[in-house]
Image (spheres, grey):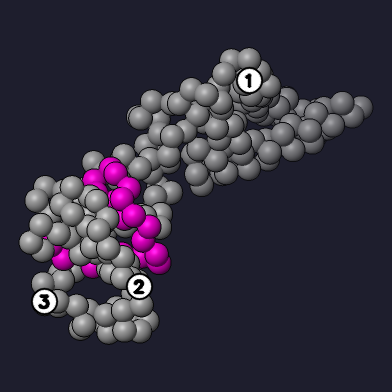
Amino acid sequence: MKQMMRPGIRQVHRRLGKLVAVFFIFLACTGGLLNHSPALKLDQVHIPSFLAGAYMDDIAVPAGKEINGTWVYGLGGKLWFDEKPVAECYPALAGVLPGDGEIHALCGTTLLVLTQDARLVEEQPGWLGSSSADVFGALPDPARWSALVPIDTRLVQAHVPMVTWEKFILDIHSGAYFGGLGVFFLDMVALFVIVMAVSGLIMTRR
């Protein structure tokens, strides 16, 4: 019976060995690149945008308002005019109101007054309490403070992190670049290695 089982075990061992070998070659190549990252300057060169697209999942699409072709929105504790940061904005942007030559932006309970060309004119903290509803009621023309909407996709792409080749290779080396699929694949490879170890022990038994 054991003699009949061994050809099947040997076949499984060989097939898994080929799959695991390809994976180990991949790990050896990426690991070698990481070891020589300073010499290759991989920590100084950024990957192209089509590869960096996977990192967009880490960015929450901010909300804002388009005024005369310019998007005004909050992201990362800052107020942005298109791709230009113009002021601090904590804890988050609550509303935007265009005026005569000015733009009012409400960040939490702090009112920012800016020019159309993104120059900060005035900052007025402490507007009537902690809730946005209280603040809106005290602002000029509160009915004109419309709800914020998700900004243009073009601007979201502009905020994709500048990812170096070193980080990219490290992420594909660890499987992090592929998200949950990468974790699943590494688990499968680990399982294959265990099966190969067990099948190898079985085949060496006399």
Mark yes or no: residue 19 visible. Answer: no
Q: Position of residue 24 (x, y in %)?
A: 66, 24
Q: Is residue 206 above or below residue 109?
A: above
Which numbered mark, 3 or 2, is in the foreground of this view? 2
For disc 1, the marked residue is 38
Disc 3 secondary structure class: loop
Q: Earlier in the sequence, mark 2 or mark 1?
A: 1
Q: Earlier in the sequence, mark 3 or mark 2?
A: 2
For disc 3, the marked residue is 141
Residue found 39% across the figure and 50% down from its top: 59
Q: Earlier in the sequence, mark 1 or mark 3?
A: 1
Which numbered mark, 2 or 1, is in the foreground of this view? 2
Residue found 56% across the figure and 26% down from its top: 43
Give left or right: position of 145 versus 190.
left
Q: Position of residue 29 (x, y in %)?
A: 62, 19
Which residues, given as a range, are shown in magenta? 79-98
